[in-house]
Image: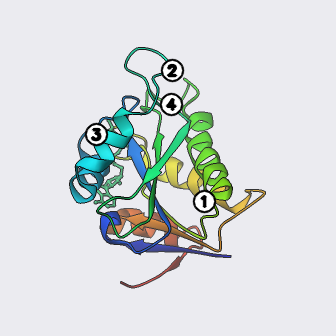
């Protein structure tokens, strides 16, 4: 199993699945969610909207994950997960963020995914501090009982790339 960090637009990656940092509605948004929906096209939104709501307005509770096709993306599938909003660190944020990685890996295993790209979940709009989030991401993947052949942490800026590299994750130049 290889784990690498690569600075790229996740919508361009030719992998079995990319992970989307979504919100609970699964109906799109800004950041990486917006980019993925724009690149995937309307089929992705239709597939997400068809997901059953577990309660009004919630198709994917925080920490859980759902899988759809990739539609117009090079990636064959999209695993949508909802990270925690950072509220200072004493509201269960760390456990919920770890659950995003764990549940995404669980779906990847169930769907025979061999190459999987994660964005830096919750570190944008949701305000999770980069260092703490990166610790959780790296630990969750490295200690997972099952891993795909290739895990790619896809970063969108030098600071995030450095955060993974400083934790021993090899940088793959695009
Ligand atoms: N490719 C890779 N990474 C990206 C891309 C992209 N095209 N666009 C943004 N990112 C990075 C951001 O720089 C950040 O490091 O993804 C990380 C997660 O940031 P957000 O997309 O803001 O996600 P998050 O912090 O989890 O907030 C989720 O934002 O877009 C809404 O609908 C989404 O409500 C949800 C919330």
Q: Is mark 3 within 8 Å of ligand 1?
A: yes
- Lower position in the chain sequence, tag 1 or tag 4: 4
Residue pictured at 51% horizontal, 42% vertical: 66
Give the residue at mark 3.
28
- Lower position in the chain sequence, tag 4 or tag 3: 3
Q: Badge 1 local density, few (<14 within 10 Å), some, or many (20+)?
A: some
- Lower position in the chain sequence, tag 2 or tag 1: 2
Give the residue at mark 4.
62
- Lower position in the chain sequence, tag 3 or tag 1: 3
* Of the pair 36 and 164, the residue shown nearer to us: 36
Q: Are marks 3 and 1 in contact (CB under 8 Å)?
A: no
Q: As displayed, is residue 72 above or below residue 13?
A: above
Give the residue at mark 2.
54
Mark 3–mark 2 Cα distance, whole angstroms, equals 17 Å
- Assign the C terminus to one quadrant of the image: bottom left
Residue pictured at 46% horizontal, 72% vertical: 15
Give the residue at mark 1.
138
């Amino acid at each position: 199993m290889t784990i690498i960090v690569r600075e790229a637009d996740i919508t361009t990656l030719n992998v079995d699945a990319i992970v989307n940092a979504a919100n609970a509605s699964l109906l799109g948004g800004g950041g990486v969610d917006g980019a993925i929906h724009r690149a995937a096209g309307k089929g992705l939104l239709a597939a997400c909207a068809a997901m059953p709501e577990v309660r009004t307005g919630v198709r994917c509770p925080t920490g859980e994950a759902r899988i759809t096709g990739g539609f117009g993306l090079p990636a064959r599938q999209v695993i949508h997960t909802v990270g925690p909003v950072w509220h200072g660190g004493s509201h269960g944020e760390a456990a919920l963020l770890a659950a995003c990685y764990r549940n995404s890996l669980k779906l990847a295993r169930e769907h025979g995914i061999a190459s999987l790209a994660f964005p830096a979940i919750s570190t944008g709009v949701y305000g999770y501090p980069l260092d703490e989030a990166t610790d959780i991401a790296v630990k969750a993947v490295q200690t997972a009982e099952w891993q795909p052949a290739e895990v790619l942490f896809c970063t969108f800026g030098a600071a995030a790339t450095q955060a993974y590299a400083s934790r021993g994750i090899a940088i793959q130049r695009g």
